[in-house]
Structures are given as structure tokens and as C-alpha cells.
Amino acid sequence: MTIAYIAASTGVSVPTVSKVINGRSGVAAETRARVEAAIREFGYQRSAPPTRSNLVELVFDQLDDMWGVQIIRGVERMARQQRVGVVLTELGSGRGGTRYWIDDVIDRRPDCLVTVAQLGEEQRSQLRARGIPFVVFDPTVELPDGVPFVGATNWAGGRAATRHLIGQGHRRIALISSADRILSCRARLDGYRSAMEAAGLPVDGDLVVQAGLSVDGGRAAALELLRGPQPPTAIFASNDLQAVGVYQAARVVGLRIPADLSVVGFDDLPIAALVDPPLTTVHQPLVEMAVAATELALALGRGERAPRTGIELATTLTVRQSTATRVG
Amino acid sequence: MTIAYIAASTGVSVPTVSKVINGRSGVAAETRARVEAAIREFGYQRSAPPTRSNLVELVFDQLDDMWGVQIIRGVERMARQQRVGVVLTELGSGRGGTRYWIDDVIDRRPDCLVTVAQLGEEQRSQLRARGIPFVVFDPTVELPDGVPFVGATNWAGGRAATRHLIGQGHRRIALISSADRILSCRARLDGYRSAMEAAGLPVDGDLVVQAGLSVDGGRAAALELLRGPQPPTAIFASNDLQAVGVYQAARVVGLRIPADLSVVGFDDLPIAALVDPPLTTVHQPLVEMAVAATELALALGRGERAPRTGIELATTLTVRQSTATRVG
DNA sequence: CTGAAAGCGCTTACAG
DNA sequence: CTGAAAGCGCTTACAG
């Protein structure tokens, strides 16, 4: 598809088509319209030497989550192996700049995109229209069929953490969950329930508390649990920050960890090993997940058919010193 | 820069250069080498339309330092304000891929570069040859005059931290320093000495210990200090990770913080507020530093004369609960 | 407003 | 292995 072909099919000269494409003046409105119609009809792309940009876009909503670095490192590692640059964007909560952002992405013509942010359907279809494939990292909402993603086995992780506590003799095991709409947390909750039911333990309504995925959220939820009429002997938090909040609450209430209260987190952030006592937590292989997401995205960007559209990598329980056999 | 120019300067024909660029056969090895050298030398890019790439490169040695995210956020904020994409690279300790990396950077033709890594003089001159300006973030080694940089007032921060401890009545104040070659740590050390001397306090040789900028380094150094014949009543660590190591050592030795031992860190990472007790530390305005570095780099990239080549932003002491008036 | 002609940067086919 | 020549897709300057 060349401008010569467009010219021939419209019955004008090559220079005229050139002017239209480059927005030059000196073309009659009617001629311009006919040429534009032909360009659209034949799907001409400006001399598009389909050169690869050798860029992968990595998009976050918020980067202050402590696991951002791990994801970045994984994406970076795979991208560098394939000699591709990583363009990083933090959309921010306001989302004011999202409109500009998508324009800039399209200007950059990246080979593909890995998104930790929840892109709207409008943005997804804009990317699809430009042929820019994308992979969703750890989806927090239900995705339409066929949208590629890489996640972790949250349900199995929740189950393993709960079973670990049950194995230590705990019976009143509380869960600090998060907003229902976060898919991974719902899976952790179901894993918890599954393990409890398998052990024949009742899941009292007052054992499951919702809280934000932050230190403050975890502390408030733990205080509520520990000050209740029948406090739990173990708390499973939905992430490590919440678990740090549980530590703070235990200190306030005067409980020792793990002697009086066992605590399990989720994620295995660097801080998990640094807090006192070191935190037992469900390890999420963030770096490997990021590597896999990038590999998939780059393969799609090269036009390869994906062997599978969705992958979940295994979580593993990392036992440290915040859990102990229940006494009394 | 055209292949005709490369051909003329190498003394071969245009078709020959074309073959080299496109990896075709039928070119003598020696000829190929000469042409490739010329291509590198003149920074030829295939059909390079000298459009701005609207990219800024951000380079780290290692991203696992906890302050990486803060720097990224600052760079991202300023870049997005100017509609520029951030390309992030982690060189890794091996540095094996540095050669490839610089080639890739040159291919991308970024408008400018912000480096947290220590680039060698060779790389710096390659960038200069292509007219890609760069700004060094928090230089750890002495830079030649005229190399733009953004840092923090490390000397003043070390002084402020030490004065804070002196003001609380401490006299035996130890410093956990780092390798001498790290400029910022040497400045912190001198700030410490300056404050000690101003207060007429002796700086015993056994009060200053060198250790890696890590939790393990801090712990080992603190154990050495606390088990010595005349243990200090306060320890100033060269970063927050070392301070966390001091916490661990205090626990081992059976000292309470801050009742028996005061601790001050440096950086003010997110963990500083999360540890128990919350850590008094010197706040380094990493986000603002990154914003300033990027603003400077982008201005240089637009060809503007820099109003100044080096900037140091002020550190501030954040007093939390790891320091207390010395008793006894 | 239009397009013939010249030109640009590059590639290809082929003669030496 | 090398490069003169032809050709390709496109743009520019300009005659009508």
C-alpha cells in the first residue's frame, strides 16, 4: 500500500496525496475529502516502516505500594534480555492525566504493554485498535475472556496460610480481608474459608473483618478483633502492611507475638523479614510474575499467538517467627 | 546524517554501507568493521527524522534499595508534566550488559538522562558525543567540574543528627559509617565530627565503625560497639537499614530503645515509621531531588543553558521515638 | 489547485 | 567483494 496506489485509485497525482497526508495546504476541499476516503478505505499508513520501537510500557496506578519495585525489576529483567526499553508510568489516583497518557503511549508506539493499573474498557479498545497488545498484572477485577493476565494463586495461598495456623492448633482464626471488589483478596478469603471448612471449623461472622490494605487498616481491624468478646488466637492478614498493623495492635493490647497471638501476612515484602518477630507470610513471586507477564506481552507484540491467555504462578508459605503452636 | 555521509567518510560506496546496516552478506569483514566504526562514531540512525523522542532515561545500578521507588516517582512526576516518557534501566551489579545498554540508549535517542548509577567516563563521553545531556543523582564519587548533579545536604544532615543527640545529653555517640569512597557517607561522617568538635566532645577512634549500608552491616557494627569496653549511649547510623540492624543488635544485647540506647538513621524510608519504636532519622527529600534532577535534565535536553550545574536540597531531622534524653 | 519534474535517502540486481 | 546504475516511495519547488 503506497501513496502511488492511493493516487491511482483516486485519480489524482502522487504529490497531491502526499500533501493531504502531510496536512499541507494547496489541495481543494473536495479533492482532499476523496483522498482521505481512499486512505481510510485502503488502510494506508504513512510510509509506516513497521520498525519496532523496542519499548514496553509498564503502567501503575500508584507506585508507593512496596511491591512496585519487585514488579519493575522483573519487567526490566525480561525486557533487557530482549533488548527492549521499559517505559514506566504512574497514573496517580486522580487519573486526570489519563487522557494525555494514552495519547503519549500511542505516539511512542510501544511493542506491548504490561499494566498493574486497571485500564478502562475505552483504553483497552484504543490499544487494541492500534494493535498494541497488553497483559494485565495481578488483575483486581474480573476481566473479559481473552484478556491476557498474569496473577498468583491467591486462593491456594489463603488456604495454605490458614492450614498452617490450623496445624498449630488454632481454632479461632480471624481474617482481615479487604474491599470485596478486589479479586485477589476475595480469592484469599475463599481459600481461608475452604481451609476452615475442611478442618470442620466454624467461620463465625465476627472472625472476618474488612479493612484497607494498609498498616492503619490492619491496626484498626486487629484492635476490633482483639477487644471483642471472643478474641482470636491467630490473625491472617490480607497483606504484609495489614500484618504490621496487627503487630501494633497487639502491642497496644499487651499481647506478645507469637506467644499470645499468631500472625500471618501475604506478599512477603522486604519488611516481612525485618519486623520483630520476623513475619510468617505467603510469598508472592512478584519478580517471576513480572518476568512472565513481560515475556507474554513481548511475544504478543511480535505477533506470536499466545500459548495461553492467563497464567497464575504459585504462592508459597514462608514460615518465620510470628506463628506458634497454640497454648492454653 | 545519511548513509551517503557515512560512505564518503569511510571511503566506500553507498550500497556497501547499506549492506552493513541491513546485515547483508557480501561485505569484507575489514570493510564491515570500518563502516560499523563510522556508524558508531557519527551516531547514524536509519532514516533518522530528528524528531524529539520525548523520552528521559532513568538508570539505576541496583533497584532493590528501598529508596528507588521514591526517585522513580519524582522523575515520573516531572516527566509526565512535560509529556515525556520515562525509560527505566537497572544495570545490575554484574555490569555485563552495560555495553549493550549504551547502544540501546543511543538507539532510543532520549532527550536526556538521569543517572543514579555511576557511569564510567567512557559512557559519559559517548553520551556527550551524541548530545544527550545527563544529570547525576546523589553522586557517590567526586565528579569532574561541570557535570550536573542533584544531591542532598549530607554534611548538614549528619551535623543535625549528631547535635540532636548531644542536645539530649549523650556524650559517647557512635557513628556507623560506610566505605570511604561513598561521598555522601563521608559528608555525613564529617558532619558528625563537626558537631562533636563544636560541642567539645572527643571523637574516639573506636566510636566510628565502618559497615555496609545494610541491615546485616548495621547489626554487626552495633554488636561490636555495644560489646566493647565503653559502649556508646547513642548510635547514629548512616542509613535506615543500618539503623534497623542496630535495633536487632540492641535486642540481642538486651538494651531497650530509646531507654538504654538512642538510635538515629538517615534517609527516612517508609520503614522508618513502621519499626518499633518509630525511628528518628534524617529525612532526605528524594522525591523533590528527583523532580529537580529531571527538570534540569529536560531543560538541558531542550538546549537551555543550566542556571547552575549542581544542586543540593536540604535534609531535615525527623524526630520520632528512637531517641531520648540520656539518663544515668 | 494540480501535477510534471527533480531530488532525497535508501535498496536491489548485477557487471566487473 | 565492490560499486555504478536503476529503481522505490516519498517530498519539494515550481510551471501552468
Image (spheres, coloured by chain):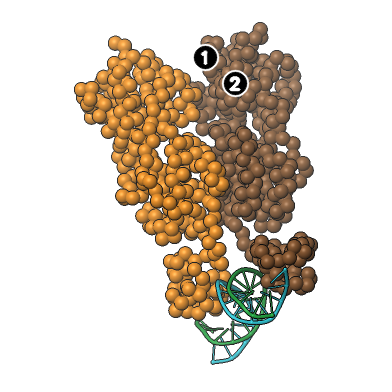
Chain colours: A brown, B orange, C cyan, D green
x and y percentages locating residue A151 in the rendered image? 67, 39
Asked whether residue A251 is in view, the answer is: yes
The residue lying toward the viewer, choosing from B55 and B16, is B55
Q: Residues within 10 Å of mark 1 (few under 14, many from 20)?
A: few
x and y percentages locating residue A234 in the rendered image? 62, 18
- Given this view, does label 1 or label 2 mark the residue nearer the observer? 2
Number of disc labels: 2
Quarter of image, res B311: top left
The residue lying toward the viewer, choosing from A37 and A97, is A37
A73 to B240, vertically: above or below: below
Q: Residues within 10 Å of mark 2 (few under 14, many from 20)?
A: many
Inspect the image, locate mark 2, and give the three-letter code of the amino acid beneath it: Gly
Inspect the image, locate mark 1, and give the three-letter code of the amino acid beneath it: Arg
Q: Which residue is mark 2?
A: A218
Q: Which residue is mark 1?
A: A251
Q: Chain of mark 2?
A: A
